[in-house]
Image (cartoon, helix red, strand yellow):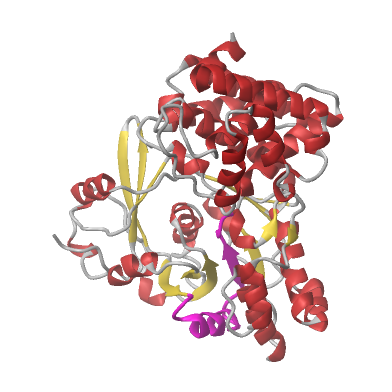
């Protein structure tokens, strides 16, 4: 089978979209740290759509942990296929905006030199919540994180995203080159200000003068990103080959829906994102909060409860009317009242989310969404819970999501089988669970003592404690599916 590449596209079958510009004229203007599936389904697609008229905004991606993306895309000249799926079928499009992928572990100097180049005006990130080396409960840099400790001791050979950003900014400052803009595209609360705090603090710890320069001169626009991107399977690869006639080592599966809201704060310049469907606004935070609390909070709740109930995919869980009602009620009764967005149809957004969750073609695994819960819970569920507790309002549905997470991270499912819990704190949590046994109160007290997740306020709140423990008791006694059915009546 012929491999996808710049040479093979012209001879490939028709019926799918290919870049409508001459890639040989495209030059890099963006370095993207963490070039995983989401970036390639989202930001890289927007950039691909504008390169015909703005060829100086190509992307060079960097893999920070593993070389697998580089190894997959290098023989393909950076090209890959995005397959958009819904119940009506699948549409394929080859994306050409990624010019090159660097492996940060073996090409660190090359990556830092490129980031220090005047041609690079934006450094963007999708490194997941844990890649920021911060405490999710506070949003502050964790100076004791192993990667941060390493990078402060070895500033010229960093391995964390904050360390790499600051190392490149230090090079630009020394060369009197204008700093690039740092744009987070991760699901962090107030991702622009949060990234700013993390990067500025790291720079201060490295050199107070450098920290002051970063604080004064570097822009950190906020963003809200939204597109559901499941993991790619071998069956997906075979399907893409059947559509295009070309072998693609790492195609991307996604849904038709895509949204990108961007704060307009790019002193070094930016592509005209608004011409290709992005929303460029003065204040992105209300949109970000809406998405975190409605989409991401619902997704995590579905993931933990759905997995425990035996549902491999989100769409499977949404085939149960009780789960649909639970998520509808969570958004309507508990999330929406915490949002202040005049002129935005939040009920319409809710209905759109429910329809997206039902998409049977996506096959978005509950296990995938359940990863890294300690990094996700504070912004997806706990922030909403705090707001409702302050207003003396019920947290029934939100607390069930937290209880399901606590039950999930015990590492044993309802059939007694092992759960592969992927989380930076997995070993600590399983030790806590082992000590708690089947005692819901002991499990709550042990897990809620993780102050980097829950802070110190929530464990001491009697309403929070009582509601979560009540749900845990039900999950232990009758299981996830019956608990959901009883709750929604």
Residue sitting at the far left: 1
Q: How many marks?
A: 0
In the rendered image of this protein, does residue 377 appear above or below residue 173?
above
Question: As drawn, is 423 to the left or to the right of 331?
Answer: left
Residue 449, horizontal then vertical, whole percent: 73, 43
Tell me which corner region of the image, top left, top right, bottom left or bottom right, holds residue 195.
bottom right
Indicate the position of residue 102 as horizontal and vertical percent values.
44, 75
Q: Which of the two residues, 156 or 324, is positioned nearer the viewer here? A: 156
Q: Is residue 79 magenta?
A: no
Rendered residue at 51%/63% (across/down)? 34
Residue 163 appears in the picture as rendered: yes
Q: Residue at horizontal 78%, vertical 37%?
A: 459
Q: Position of residue 19 (x, y in %)?
A: 35, 61
Q: Is residue 179 above or below residue 397?
A: below
Residue 118 covered by magenta stretch: yes
| Direction from residue 57 to residue 186 in the image, left or right | right
Q: Nearer the viewer, residue 179 or 162?
A: 162
Magenta stretch: give its range: 104-128
- Residue 339 in view: no
Q: Position of residue 472 (x, y in %)?
A: 62, 25
Q: Farthest residue to the top: give it.
A: 489
Q: Decide which of 356, 45 is in the foreground and name it.
A: 356
In the picture, the quarter occupied by the N terminus is: bottom left
Residue in view at x 54 percent, y 50 percent: 423
Apparent side of residue 233 relative to residue 401 in the rendered image (left or right): left
- Check the picture and name the quadrant holding the C terminus: top right
Among the 4 quarters of the image, the one containing residue 470: top right
């Amino acid at each position: 089978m012929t491999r996808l590449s710049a040479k093979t596209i012209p001879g490939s079958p028709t019926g799918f979209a290919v870049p409508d510009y001459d890639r040989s004229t495209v030059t890099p203007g963006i370095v993207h740290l963490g070039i995983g599936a989401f970036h390639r389904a989202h930001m890289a697609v927007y950039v691909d759509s504008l390169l015909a008229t703005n060829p100086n905004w190509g992307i060079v991606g960097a893999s920070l942990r593993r070389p697998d993306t580089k190894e997959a895309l290098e023989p393909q000249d950076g090209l890959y296929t995005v397959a958009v799926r819904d119940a009506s079928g699948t549409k394929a499009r080859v994306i050409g905006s990624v010019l090159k992928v660097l492996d940060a572990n073996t090409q660190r100097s090359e990556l830092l030199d490129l980031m220090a180049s005047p041609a690079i005006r934006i450094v963007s990130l999708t490194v997941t919540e844990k890649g920021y080396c911060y405490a999710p409960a506070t949003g502050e840099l964790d100076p004791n994180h192993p990667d941060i400790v390493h990078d402060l001791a070895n500033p010229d050979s960093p391995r964390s995203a904050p360390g790499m950003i600051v190392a490149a900014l230090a090079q630009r400052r020394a060369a009197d080159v204008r700093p690039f803009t740092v744009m987070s595209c991760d699901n962090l609360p107030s991702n622009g200000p949060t990234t700013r705090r993390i990067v500025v603090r790291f720079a201060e710890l490295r050199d107070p003068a450098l920290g002051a320069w970063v604080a004064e001169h570097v822009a950190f626009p906020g963003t809200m990103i939204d597109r559901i991107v499941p993991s790619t399977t071998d069956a997906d690869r075979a399907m893409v080959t059947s559509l295009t006639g070309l072998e693609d080592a790492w195609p991307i599966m996604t849904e038709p829906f895509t949204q990108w809201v961007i704060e307009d704060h790019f002193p070094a310049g930016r592509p005209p994102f608004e011409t290709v469907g992005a929303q460029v606004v003065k204040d992105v935070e209300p949109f970000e909060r809406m998405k975190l609390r409605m989409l991401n909070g619902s997704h995590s709740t579905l993931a933990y409860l759905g997995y425990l109930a035996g549902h491999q995919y989100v769409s499977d869980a949404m085939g149960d009317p009780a789960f649909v009602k639970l998520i509808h009620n969570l958004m309507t009764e508990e999330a929406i009242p915490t949002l202040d967005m005049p002129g935005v149809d939040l009920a319409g957004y809710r209905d759109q989310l429910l329809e997206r969750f039902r998409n049977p073609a996506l096959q978005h695994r509950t296990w995938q969404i359940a990863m890294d819960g300690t990094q996700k819970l504070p912004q997806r569920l706990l922030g909403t819970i705090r707001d409702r507790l302050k207003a003396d309002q019920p947290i029934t549905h939100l607390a069930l999501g937290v209880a399901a997470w606590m039950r999930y991270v015990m590492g044993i499912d309802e059939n007694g089988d092992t759960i592969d819990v992927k989380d930076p704190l997995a070993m600590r949590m399983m030790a806590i669970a082992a000590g708690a046994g089947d005692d819901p109160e002991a499990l709550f007290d042990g897990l809620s003592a993780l102050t980097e997740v829950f802070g110190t306020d929530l464990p001491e709140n009697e309403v929070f404690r009582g509601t979560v423990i009540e749900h845990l008791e039900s999950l232990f006694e009758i299981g996830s599916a019956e608990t959901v059915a009883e709750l929604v009546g």
